[in-house]
Structure formats: structure tokens, C-alpha cells
Amino acid sequence: MTPMITNPTWIFLVMLLIILLAPIVLRRLRVPHIIGLILAGILVGEHGLNLLARDASFELFGQVGIYYIMFLAGLEMDMGSFRRYGRRGVGFGFLTFVLPFAVGLGVGSWVLGFELPSSMVLSALLASHTLVAYPIVSRYGLGKEGSVVQSIIATAMATFGALLVLAIVVRGVRGGGNWLYWLDFSVRIVIYVVGVAYAFPKVGRWFLRRNEDAVTQYTFILAMVFVSACLASLVGLEGLLGAFLAGLVLNRIIPHGGPLMVRIEFVGNALFVPYFLIGVGMLIDVGVLVGDSATLGMSAIIIVAATASKWIAAWAMQRATGGTAIDRKMMFGLTNSHAAGALAIVMIGAQPDVGLIGPQMLNATVLLILVSCLVSGMATGMAARDMALKTTEMGRNRGSYHGKCLTAYAYPQTVDKITQLAIMLRNPTIPDSLMGLAVAMDDDPDDALRTQGQRNLALARDIAAAADVRMSTMSRVSSNVASAIVHTMREVDAGEVIMGMHETDGGHLAGKLGVTSQSVLQSTHREVILVRMLMPPGTVRRIVVAVPQRAEYEVGFYKWLEHLCRIGELTGQPMRFHTLGDTGFYIKGYMEEHHPSVRFELMVEQGFGKLLLRLPSEVNADHLVVFVTSRPDFISHTPAMNTLPSVIARSFSHANVMLLYPDQYGDPHETFSVFAPNGQSVTQRQMLFEQWLNKL
């Protein structure tokens, strides 16, 4: 039957209206938007009102959409969480994959009467799950809780395992060979996985460092996804498994919350993924779903089997690790929803050349997605509320004063990299936390500097907007640049200021602090960060931090540590702290309490001067080396700090460098807690200072 709408313009308009209105309407009914788009597809498809035909455009955009779903699933994994919760996460991943898989085999073979290949497809469908309810956890700020991290790791394992089983089954149905064939197949898989894991990050970093255009970067990443998908098809795997692997290996070079990540998520969620979901809905025959009691019975059996097996896996993990009932509820809620993975599996199984999934199973999967997402949302919501009440304590938010992050721009070639760094450093809990400033001298005869400053601010706003971050900007004319910066800090209540390092006209480090930097340091006690970035901050491979002795006695200790941890979390790169004395104990205590997912190591040095002599041999061009220093006459200051600018120019000109002057006593600061080497909590910085005095 010919559809009512055939004009391409009208087809695209209808699609845009569905993508726009379906989530808005169903959000009021507390129905996940993924279900809304599928229901909309049922309504406009040939089995509904027959408004649209599922033509070649749905095939094309749908294929891109399913790759996009799997790519984002890999890209959004918190890879740093493996360090602390890796073993438990792997254990939970094993349970939440094996138990539903075994239940699926039994239900498919003995209850539903499926052949073994179809039963294995059903088992893979039940074993996989999607983190549909994760936004609820994120809204409560519980992303670092143990049960949440374990569920994220389990998601990666279950998804990969289910897709791998699916690939093997499909290959067997399409004509698998003898044991030599399967040996060759296994070798090809290993070569493919190792090759992609080794080559993609290196190629990605190389390209992103040399091309800063937003469109070019996005197109390159999308091309990498399809290269991985094509390679997966060549070795006999499904392309969507290649897209998932591309997301995992590119995870560390695309900072979460950065402009590139926002662009990737925006394009996918705005176009490709909705097209895929609507196309899935257009395949559903409502008449079969409602009028066929066999389909309803099959749906009930599959829903009960999927829900029960995921709950048993969460219960077993809770008992094995000594967790609480809230942990069990959280793990069950996050791993119970079947969405993207289930859709991918059932669509592949329903392909004509595979023929393992029939119309009844396809419709039953849609009901499974609907029910599991609703149950998952309710369970996760209740667990999140209970967990938030349990973990909230007085004085939980520690640190010195955190105000807006002010970035002072001078040169157009540094705007992009400094802005990306500022987006990482800013405090995301403060409204309008990012501020840009350009200062022009009042004796500029033709306003050239003021014009260039306004261009710099416009570029910075665009970069921040691409990361979905609002940046306020201010252009000032003054006879003294440093005075304008300090006055702006006080006016906007900035907690820190980011500035470029002093360079010569040839673009080389000058080897000394500029007049502006010195004046700012003398005029404010707030944190001052001087940077020189040779590459986008998201592409650095390691963060090396040189910390002076007694740094923990400074009022801004936990503030700069928090800033560096944000960079470590968003880039996913390891951190190496070179410390003296007992400082490392305080760093370790804070990071284990507040940033357990960040990989870090501590190295105790014999002296700050000796460290400066040895450190250049450990720092590569793709490292970010941070020198934590101090203003003169403060507790952690040493004479070696006076030579830092010249040492950086002489020995670290090849690397990305940050010279960080922490908050010092002089402005009102909030009290904070630290974790002493003996595990006791010290809640006032004055007590630390008194301890230091007693040692003298």
C-alpha cells in the first residue's frame, strides 16, 4: 500500500517533528524517550497510519544510528574506574552476563522451543543491557559510587560478550567451517582487536593535535568509527561491534564534556539515533502484537526471564562483596534496562540471510524494552535517593574558595587550547562559572589591540558553546593590564585566573615571568595559573606534577589538587605526583576519597632542586607537566622556585607546561578537611599549621 507522504521535503519535516515532539510529550508521562521514538515509528509506519514508507533513507540513517549507539556506549565508559573497582566490576560483568545467558538458553530451548542458534540469540539479548537510567545517577552526583562504577564496567563486559556471541552465531548460520576455519576466525579477531587498540589512539592523537577545525575533527572521528566497523566486517564480526570497540579505544583522547565530545553526542542524538529508533518502530506490526496471544505469552516469558536473571546477578554480587540493599537495588536498576544492545541484536537476527528472529520475537523485544526501561528507571531512582541521603555528610564539600574561572586572553593562537583547559578546570557546580577577559591598552592609537581582543573573546565563546558551556566575556581598556585583570577578578568574584606564559616575539618561552604575571601575583592571593599548551589538552597522555615540600599546609592545597583531578578525569590520563616529605599521604587520601577513578602514582623525592634536574628526562612532548609553586614568604616556598621560569624555558620547552600558584592566606576561605597519614580527619587548616610549627 502506497504511503500518504512521498515528497522528500515532507518526509524530513515529519521526521523532525517526531524527533522534536515525541520526547516532550512522553517525558510528561515519565516514559523514556527511546520508547517514545519507537512508538512514534509504529504510529507513522505501514502497520500504523501508513504516513511514511521505510525506504532507503531509513536503511542508511538507521545503519549509521545503530553504529552511533554502540560507539557512544564505548565512548562514555569511565575507563579510569577500572583501577579501583576493576576486579569487582569484572566479577559483576561475569555474573550479569552468564546468568541471563544461561536463563536465555533454557527458556529458548525448553520453554519456547527454539533451535540452538535462535536460543543463543535470545540469550545474548537477555545478557546485554544499556545504561538508560544513568542520567538519574548523574543528576544525584553518584557517578563515583562503587555500585555505580561496577555497573558501568559490567555494561562494557556484557555488551561486548553479547555482541561477540551474536557474531559467532551469525557466522555459523551464514556458513561456518571446520575447526581450522574457527581457528583462523579467532586469530583474525585477535589481530583486529589488538591492531585497533594500538593504532587508533596514536592516529587519533596525531590528527587532533594538527587539526583544530571543529568540522574536520568530527568528520575524522566518524570516519574512524566506520573504518573500525568495516574492518570488523572483513574479519567476520558485525560492524556494530567495531563501532563499540572504536568508542572504547578513542575514549581517552576525547575528553568528556569537551567540545568534540559534545558535538559527537549532539549530532548522534539529534539525527542518527532517532532515525534508527523510528525505523525500528516502523517494523513493528501492532496487529500481531495485540491480536496474537502467542506473542503476548512469549513477551511475558521473556520479560520475566530477563528481569529475574538480572536481579539474581545483582543479588549475588551484593552478597559476594558485602554490599547493602541499596547497592543491590542500584546495580539491578542500572543493568536491567534492555535498549540499544537488544535492538541491535534483534535487528541483526531478523535479517533475511540470518533468519533467527521472527515477527513474534521482534514484537516481544519491543515490549521487553518498554517494561525493562520503566522498571530500571524506578529502581534506579529509588536507589539514588536512598544512596544520596546515606552518603551526604556535613562538611562534605571541602576546599578553599571556588569562584568563577577567569581566563585572560592575549594572543589568538592560544585561545583554543587555553579555553579547552579552562573548561576542564572550572567548577561545574557554579552557575556561569567561566569568564573570558581581554584587556587593551588605552594608548592604542588605532584600537587594533581592542579589536583583536574582541575577536579572541568571540572565538573563546564559540569554543565554550561547542562544549555546551556558557562563557561570559568582558573587554576592558586600561593603562595597566595587570590592574585590569585583578579588578575583574574582584568584580566577578573569580576564584582563579588562567594566563598564558610570557613568550618572546618568536613564540619561545622568555625564561622569566612577564611584568603582567608578576603584578597579578603580587596583587591577588587567589590561584594564578600560567600555561603554555602546544597541543589540545584532551590529547595529552600523562600529567606529571611536581609538588614542593609542605604544600599541604597552604590554604589552596586541595583547590589546585581538585583542578588537576578534573583534568585527569576528563582526559582519562594517568597522573604522576613527585612529592617531598609527607605531602604524598595527603594527596593519596584526598584522591582515594574524592576521585577514586583517576589513575595516579606517587614518587617521593629528596629535594625540589634535584627534582628539577632529573625531571626533564621523564617528560615527553605529549605530557602535561605541572609545577606547583608558591609566592615568596609562604610556607612551601623554596629558593629553587625563583628559577622555575628559566628552568622551564631551558628544559621543558618541548612539553605542555603549567605553572601553578595556589591560593595563599589573605582572602576569606572556607575550611576544609584533609586525610592525615594515620587516617584521622583534620578539619581546620590552622591545626595543620600548628603541627608544622611544633616540628620546628
Image: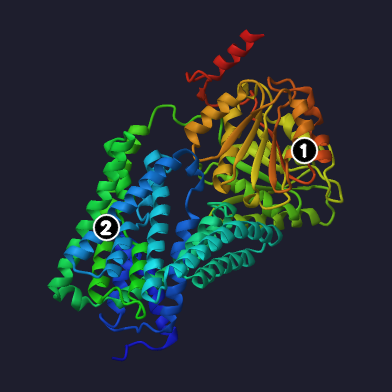
The residue at 64%/52% (across/down) is 539
Q: Report if residue 466 is visible in the image.
A: no
Task: Identify the amino acid type marked 1.
Answer: Pro
Q: Position of residue 45 (x, y in %)?
A: 30, 80
User: Which residue reaches farthest left?
Assistant: 293
Residue 21 at x, y percent in the picture: 35, 68
Give the spatial CA distance, label 2 vs label 1: 54 Å
Label 2 sits on residue: 372
Q: How many marks?
A: 2
Along the line of sight, the residue nearer the viewer: 523 or 479:
523
Residue located at (25% from left, 53% from top) = 375
Left or right: 136 in relation to 307: right
| Quarter of the image where the N terminus is located | bottom left
From the top left corner, tell me how far across and down residue 526 is, in percent. 65, 32
Q: Quick one: quadrant of the C terminus?
A: top right
Considering only vertical position in the picture, is 528 above or below 691? below
- In the displayed structure, does residue 122 sit left or right of residue 532? left
Q: Residue shown at 47%/18% (left/top)?
A: 680
Depth check: 52 or 444 in front?
Answer: 52
Asked which quadrant contains residue 160, the reply is bottom left
From the top left corner, tell me how far across and down residue 431 is, in percent.
Answer: 50, 45
Q: Which mark is residue 616?
A: 1
435 left or right of 272 in image: right
Q: Secondary structure at mark 2?
A: helix
Q: Is residue 175 above or below residue 36?
A: below
Mark found first going from the N terminus, 2 or 1: 2
Labelled disc at residue 196: none
